[in-house]
Image: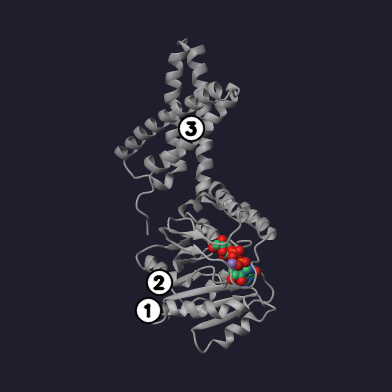
Amino acid sequence: MPELTVVVPTYNEAPNVAALLRRVDGALVGRVDYEVVVVDDNSPDGTADVVRSVQGEYPVRVVVRKDERGLASAVIEGFRQAKGEVVGAIDADLQHPPEKLPELLQKVREGADIVVASRYESGGAIEGWTLGRKVVSRGARLLAYVFAPSSRRSRDPLSGFFLLRRSAIEGVDLRPVGYKILLEILVRGHVGRVASVPFSFADREAGQSKYGVREQVNYLRHLARLMPADKGLRRFLKFCLVGGSGVLVNMGLLWLLTEVAGLFYLVSSAVAVECAILNNFLWNDVWTFRDRRAAGWRARLGRFARFNVFVLAGLGINVAFLWLFTERLGVYYLLSNLIGIAAATMWNFLVNSRWTWGAGPPRP
Ligand code: GDD
Ligand code: MN
């Protein structure tokens, strides 16, 4: 059994694939027990035949799919056929340097579940792309970070070059549309530790990219499919719902204490705010972050104290934005307040998920 299976998706890569296999072999032979699985979608240019012609020289198999097309699904097919405990993907067109494979593998051996070869790391780069495609790539990444927040664990969640421990996808139903297989795995997989290795995305030497408007549309469809599955996004929505319930508690108590109990409204407000904080804390503790809390009352009190501090700071952020947008930018004050609430919500979510209900060490 090889330790590593490298999957190479191909469509019309006849001029590139032999050189790729040679460079993969050059990087791994004698150091790593590996195999390559080329998944070709019946390329009319004879890519599969080129692979077969070098089968005597390198440990490579070719799988030809006749009734399916698509980069991501091709990679999944390759993973299905893989024998290695570590599996990964690399493009056939030499834009991903195979010489990085040993370094990637080393990080898996050291305990990472996924290692991403990343363009967006110091030391990483992109050669030869037009400004337009660079902007599209950054924009696509931003969309992923917003709508599939699990992807934030990598600086380059859209990379097509990565390795992973097979256990990260075992039993996981992967069904991406289009190109972005790594994104699919980051969102749906059992992913504990993510590591990265910077690389320089080279210019294509021969053949043509298959990336175009069609793939951009596929990407949006893919994101729409991933959104409801993303644990990070679901958690954020829960957090917002709990926040909404806090507003109701705050308003209700303010009214009750002022009108019924006859307290001065600012006194009522102080009580109402603290009760809303307590309400939010409890719901977040038993619902939003249920899977993350340590047991025991002392720990819970500690979390409550932290939550209080962060939320009060959030209130400060809300007021600061209200002031800034209204006084300095001339925005209508109710709109400024909405912006302030949005900023405070982001702050509250980020700091509390990190320090109040911190993930702690990854569980096995
Ligand atoms: N089997 C199969 N089926 N392979 C395909 C298909 C397909 O429909 N479409 C593309 N491929 C193969 C290509 O033959 C090549 O080996 C690889 O997938 C990448 O395709 P390109 O068309 O060259 O993509 P790119 O260079 O624009 O973008 C690549 O690199 C980016 C940076 O890492 C992709 O891997 C992107 O997903 C990635 O973000
Ligand atoms: Mn390419």
Figure quadrant of the C terminus: bottom left
> Label 2, label 3: how many angstroms apart (C-alpha)?
44 Å
> Label 3, label 1: how many angstroms apart (C-alpha)?
52 Å
User: Which coloring applies here?
Assistant: one colour
Figure quadrant of the N terminus: bottom left
In the rendered structure, which amino acid carries the disc numbered 1?
Answer: Arg
Q: Cβ–Cβ below 8 Å for labels 1 and 2?
A: yes
Extreme residue in the bottom direction = 56
In the rendered structure, which amino acid carries the disc numbered 3?
Answer: Ala
Q: Is residue 246 above or below residue 160?
A: above
> Label 1, label 2: how many angstroms apart (C-alpha)?
8 Å
- Report x, y in % for residue 267: 43, 14
Residue 297 vs residue 126: left or right? Answer: left
Residue at the spot of label 1 = 31
- Report x, y in % for residue 98: 47, 72
Helix, strand, or loop for circle 2?
A: helix
Helix, strand, or loop for circle 1?
A: loop
Mark 1 lies within 8 Å of ligand 1 (Cβ measured): no
User: Residue at coordinates 48% horizontally, 55% vertically from top-left?
Assistant: 120
Choose between 336 and 203: the one closer to the eye. Answer: 203
Q: Earlier in the sequence, mark 3 or mark 1?
A: 1
Residue at the spot of label 2 = 102
User: Residue at coordinates 54% horizontally, 21% vertically from top-left?
Assistant: 327
Residue at the spot of label 3 = 344
